Image (cartoon, rainbow, N blue to C red):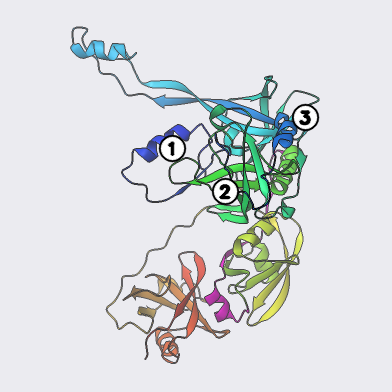
Amino acid sequence: MKRGFSMTRRFAAVFSAVFNRAAVSAAAFLFLSVATLAPAAPAMAQGRELPDFTDLVEKQAPTVVNISTTQSVRRDAPQVPQLDENDPFYEFFRRFGQRPGTPGPREFETRSLGSGFIISADGYILTNSHVVDNADEITVRLTDKREFKAKVIGADRRTDVALIKIEAGNLPVVRIGDPVKLRVGEWVLAIGSPFGFDSSVTAGIVSAKGRNLPSENFVPFIQTDVAINPGNSGGPLFNMRGEVVGINSQIYSRTGGYMGLSFAIPIDVVMDVQNQLRQSGRVSRGRIGVVIQEVTRELADSFGLAKAAGALVNSVEKGGPADKAGVQPGDIILKFDGKPVASSTELQRFVGATRPGTRSALEVWRKGASVEVHVTVAELPEDRVTARERSRPRPIEKTPNRLGLVVGDLGPDQRRDPSASGVVVEEVRGQPRGDVRAGDIITSVTTKGQTTEVKSADQFNKLLTGLDKGATLTLQVRRADTNLFVTVRIEDGK
């Protein structure tokens, strides 16, 4: 969102890169601000007039600020060759401001634009983290044209929220709304500085709530069709009561410009972050030490669940909070502190929002029944290190089983752990029916709610032989240092 493009600081580079390519194969999430030069005009409901935003804008526009930043960047310019003054290229380089024989490192000043809004009369302002990230100087301009230098109180990259402060008093302040009460289809309005045009207003509707975006695990985004362009990042999203319900943060685009998909950070998430930033300058988040994945319909059937919900535990960190609480690989976490877990992403948000040291109750689905365990939440570190993949054995020419897999018993290196069990996938043949790869180690098979530990290649292949055509089974797979569950279906008639 990591980490994405800072509103206008990187917009020119993004725009140029997009149009210098012969084709654009995938859309990208861009950290851009929300606003546009022409407001969207939704179709008028039959028998009703379009809403009037004039009073809202008149009252709330003074609470929105323009934020500009500067940053000094040292870059290596190409070395200019040593040339004689009579050489025709000597004059060429001189005209472009470079003397032949001069070295290269030069210092450049980059500028960025964004938006923000005032949350306290004494000068506290909220914006996006990427707007002020690495800035050497931050200037805040109010609607009355007064300018102030701002300092960063704290910034949280995981949610893209920053709290800054200017030395001023008696400032107009926004009213904070409740995004939980926000309804899909409701009118919303954005005010910001797209491309530096201060106090630009755009309007639209809420398209969806609780939207998950790639690599953004701690924010249930509000999706709107409010026009968004560079310079609006950090600006407020208002409901029709003039309350801020979110911070405009990202757009989804194939071109680098607005395409009808805009995303805002809910204000309740923002206010929790800013409270911690104001108190300590950093945000503390919880963790319980599990690797999880989404529960699909097929996985739910295999584990005997009535519906596809919860978070399936792939692996448990040894000695971590979940391990101490008795959580096991294969458990499906259905509730966290009494709150239903609809998806794996939602569990990450619940745990992340829990203060370290809190004792929380987990309801897990294990072997066809609900079990309650209690876990003491630990603190999430800032950086997570990705483990290196292990070397994989070469495939041996053998007959594939009913899943099209050639499997073998574990080798000496894979049996160093006395408790190690399972079979190694040596080769995947034919059309794959699941995310099983060569080198994976299959440790268990679950079908119709019953889990069987895999001890040998012969046992595993015989187990498959006894299943009916069309049977759905879930394989627990160890891949490198990670456990995951893969659902496959028996398609042949053997």
Mark 1 closeness class: few <14, some 14–19, many ≥20 residues within 10 Å: some
- Tell me which amino acid carries mark 2: Asp
Asked whether, in this view, residue 217 is left or right of residue 489, the answer is right
Query: Residue 312 location, x and y as percent?
Result: 59, 70
Which is closer to the viewer, label 1 or label 3? Answer: 3
Q: Residue at x 62, y 37 (%)?
A: 234
Give the total of numbered labels. 3
Query: Residue 25 location, x and y as percent?
Result: 37, 51
In the picture, the disc for residue 172 is 3
Query: Residue 237 location, x and y as percent?
Result: 66, 42
Q: Quadrant of residue 276?
A: top right
Q: The residue tagged with tag 3: helix, strand or loop?
A: loop
Query: Residue 255 location, x and y as percent?
Result: 43, 42
- In the picture of the structure, the residue carrying the numbered disc 2 is 383
- In the picture of the structure, the residue carrying the numbered disc 1 is 14
C-alpha separation, residue under disc 1 versus residue under disc 3: 35 Å
For marks 2 and 3 on the same chain, the one whose residue lies earlier in the sequence: 3
Which is closer to the viewer, label 1 or label 2? Answer: 1
Q: Is residue 85 above or below residue 385?
A: above
C-alpha separation, residue under disc 2 versus residue under disc 3: 38 Å
Q: Quadrant of residue 203?
A: top right
Please tell me which residue lies in front, 243 or 47: 47
Which is closer to the viewer, label 2 or label 3? Answer: 3
Asked whether, in this view, residue 16 is left or right of residue 45, the answer is left
Q: Is residue 441 above or below residue 219?
A: below
Q: Residue at x 68, y 46 (%)?
A: 49
Please tell me which residue lies in front, 466 or 406: 466
- Tell me which amino acid carries mark 1: Val
For marks 1 and 2 on the same chain, the one whose residue lies earlier in the sequence: 1
Looking at the rendering, the stretch of residues picked out in magenta corresponds to 281-306
Q: Is residue 250 magenta?
A: no
